[in-house]
Image (cartoon, grey):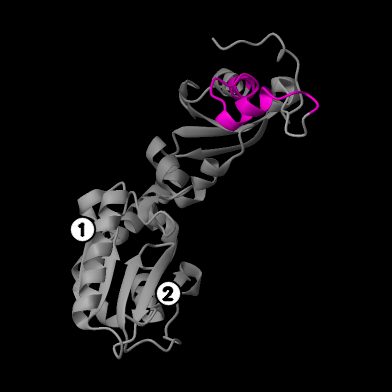
Amino acid sequence: MKVPISLVTSYEEYSNKYEGDYKTYFQLHIFSVPAIYSTYYDPRYVSVEQVKAVAENMLAVIRKNSVRKNRITMFRKENKYLISEDSEFIDEIEMLKFDGRQVKYDYVDGSDDFFAFLGQTKVDIFIRKALITIGAEELFSVIETHVDKLCKSQDRLVSRYSELRVLDKTDPHIKVEIYRIEKKYVPIKIQEFLCHSHESFILLPEYQFVNNLDKRTVYILKDMATDKTIDGTLDEAIESIKYEKWRRMNPNIFDPNDLIRMELDNDDPDYLDYKDLVKNDEELEEGDDEYFPH
């Protein structure tokens, strides 16, 4: 078998036309939303049976290695194969990414919600462009039922967004306070806004920035009528910061290689001092020396 051509196409590259030279080749694609891993086989040097065997073996390996196991599915049309993360093609709530080095699907860092990832982009447009870009538009027909379901889910979500935005403006019940924990663990309020409910705060895209706040910036939700805290407290946030700093300075698990280096003579160039091992890059603050986890 002649060496096949392997390519990785990231979602930023999805377009309305195919610019490669392998549209007529046998194809095996591993589809994930952030990127597609494609292999193209020249039909002059490989048989239909060989490509089918490779595809089936790849499916078995990925299923064995991945978090979703047998829900991972393969679709086929005209000697073009498409492996996807789920029997419904994409799990809208917890989409996965493909790890080419470990040959497995795994969780997406940061955002694992398909619709949040898409933003304003329509599902069918996104997926069709993805397949066009890799020269496999024919495969759209075999996943179209799943795409239609995803489109309907997206439409329902967009409709709910609209309802919640109206309620945010006309009937707010929740106050969101965002604090920056300054040096010496002094909290300073840096932002405040109102929303209708805990649902609108969790669901609406405009509030998703709170998921990317750094560890010294925290939010608190309060009931406007009672001023009672619904979610989060400053004491909990400060305790979490202190604990993480303490944990880094008092590790209970060490890298075996580090332990070996600590046993060397201190004049050895590979010697590792315990103080360097647990060195904390953050500046010590008032009370850190006396802190111990509750």
Q: Quadrant of the C terminus?
A: top right
Range shown magenta:
242-267
In the picture provided, is 233 more to the left or to the right than 197? right
In this view, the residue in front, 63 or 86, is: 63
Q: Which residue does the numbered mark 2 point to in the structure image? A: 6
User: How many numbered circles are shown?
Assistant: 2
Quarter occupied by the N terminus: bottom left
Q: Which mark is residue 216?
A: none
Query: Residue at the location (75% across, 25% down)?
Result: 183
Is residue 148 at all visible to an observer of this figure? no
- Measuring 18% from the left and 68% from the top, which residue is drawn there? 145
The secondary element bearing badge 2 is classed as strand
- Give the percent coordinates (x, y) of residue 248: 62, 25
Magenta region includes residue 114: no
Tell me where residue 222 appears, x and y as whole percent. 49, 27
**Dots 2 and 1: beta carbons under 8 Å?**
no
The residue that label 1 is drawn on is: 87
**What is the C-alpha distance between the residues marked 2 and 1?**
25 Å
Compare marks 2 and 1 and give the one earlier in the sequence: 2
Q: Is residue 157 left or right of residue 176?
A: left
